[in-house]
Image (cartoon, grey):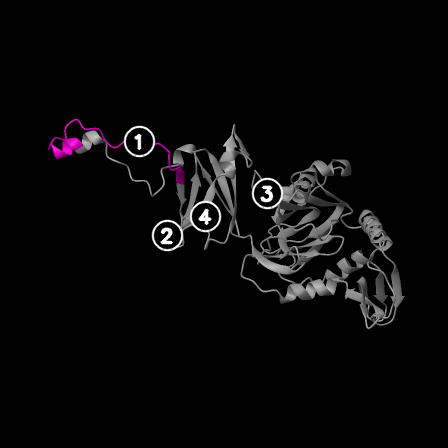
Amino acid sequence: MALFDESTIVDSGVELLNAQLAGQRLTVTSAYAGTGYVDKELLHAQTELKDQRQKTVLVSLESYEDHKRIRVQLSNTGLAQGYTLNQLLINAVLDSAENSEETALLIMQDPKGIEIPSESESPGFELEIYCVLLVTNKLQIGLIVDPAGTVKFKDLKRTMESHDMDKEAHGDIRQALKEVREAAESAGKVRPGEGPPGPELEAEAGDRYFDSAAGREYICTGTQEEDGERRTLWKEAAYQDDLEAKQDKITGTPGQVPVFNEEGDLEAQDFSGSAVFAFAAEDWGPPASWVPEEPEETQAADEAGESGGAEGPPAYDGSLGYEIAIPPETHKRKSGDFGFQVFHQVEGKYITNTWAALGTGADYDGEAGTVTLSSADPYPGKILFVG
């Protein structure tokens, strides 16, 4: 039986992907391993592992034309007791979600399982598992990479490669990939040949050419007239080694995440420092620019040398709006280059599309290091900082 052939995107994961397709940003945040399993028919409803044993390491997220692959690394460092690995859970979060807590995205299950020894039984044991998501490259998914990850995987590498080449493994995934490939090929002709295609080779936009000598594929982007002759324009298609080479060259800082932008280029973005600040309606106060005016009675009493019985300054009337100053140790931003999402708490639920939430601003003070929230009226809610 193939390893982890009982795998599925769980119900909560389907909701995450639907929200991502609607424009929200999805970030894979953690992975956990456990023992025990459930009936295959019940797997889609799981939100947690049957018996969680350890947290694993997210190493990378690789994007291809018709799928994305999450690489997870498991080691027995610090593992006091061995167990049978039956389930692997991948969690994710929507950056603009009402609830910023992690949500189950997918679960991989193998009732037979893999024996994970304790550290005392087999020091240095490591295992890498690939989780495949059948989504298009246009679906942008971020990944929070754990700096504890290494790229060793010696003893089990040959076994995993053998599994990946097994024609019986992941039958449903292979069938789905076949259907996607056939649909892509139907959009244009695929021509075999040796060597790259030249401008004299006639083709139409969308046609494909495969160089069997180099194992490369080219796509026709159109034609142009030059010196009275029709010349075909070709563009080399991106392959796995291209993407890996591009990822090897990218540089960044600790905590940044490799993400494909809208142009298809890999860039480093920081999602490690996300923070949430909750506030009550009573936390809002007058802006720093507001100066209370003394009432006329007080001024007259002062001029006459009489201070007894004079009332204090009037209460703030809200005419200049309200503010909350969030200290640096709470928001954890280093500059004004960050993203945020404000939530309005209404009847115990956090909502993003109220006038209060949509009208709230967040300004960074470079000198003081504080972030100041501004709103026309006070209200309870929270703000999520990212980047």
Residue 48: quadrant of the picture = top right
The residue carrying mark 2 is 368
Q: Nearer the viewer, residue 277 or 174?
A: 277
- Where is residue 355 shown, x and y percent of the image? 51, 34
Q: Which residue corresponds to the image point at 52% horizontal and 29% vertical from the top-left? A: 348
> Which callout, 1 or 3, points at the residue further toward the start of the chain?
3
Residue 107: quadrant of the picture = top right
Q: Which residue corresponds to the image point at 28% horizontal and 37% vertical from the top-left? A: 292
What amino acid type should be assigned to the residue bearing mark 4? His
The residue carrying mark 1 is 315
Pair 4/1: label in front: 1
> Which callout, 1 or 2, points at the residue further toward the start of the chain?
1
The answer to whether 117 appears left or right of 215 in the picture is: left
The residue carrying mark 4 is 331
What amino acid type should be assigned to the residue bearing mark 2? Ala
Q: Secondary structure at mark 4?
A: helix
What amino acid type should be assigned to the residue bearing mark 3? Glu
Mark 1 and mark 3: Cα distance apart in space: 43 Å
Q: Secondary structure at mark 1?
A: loop
- Where is residue 25 shown, x and y percent of the image? 62, 47
The label number, if any, that marks residue 102 in the structure image? 3
| Name of the residue lying farthest toward the front | 228
Residue 322 painted magenta: yes
Residue 176 painted magenta: no
Mark 1 and mark 2: Cα distance apart in space: 27 Å
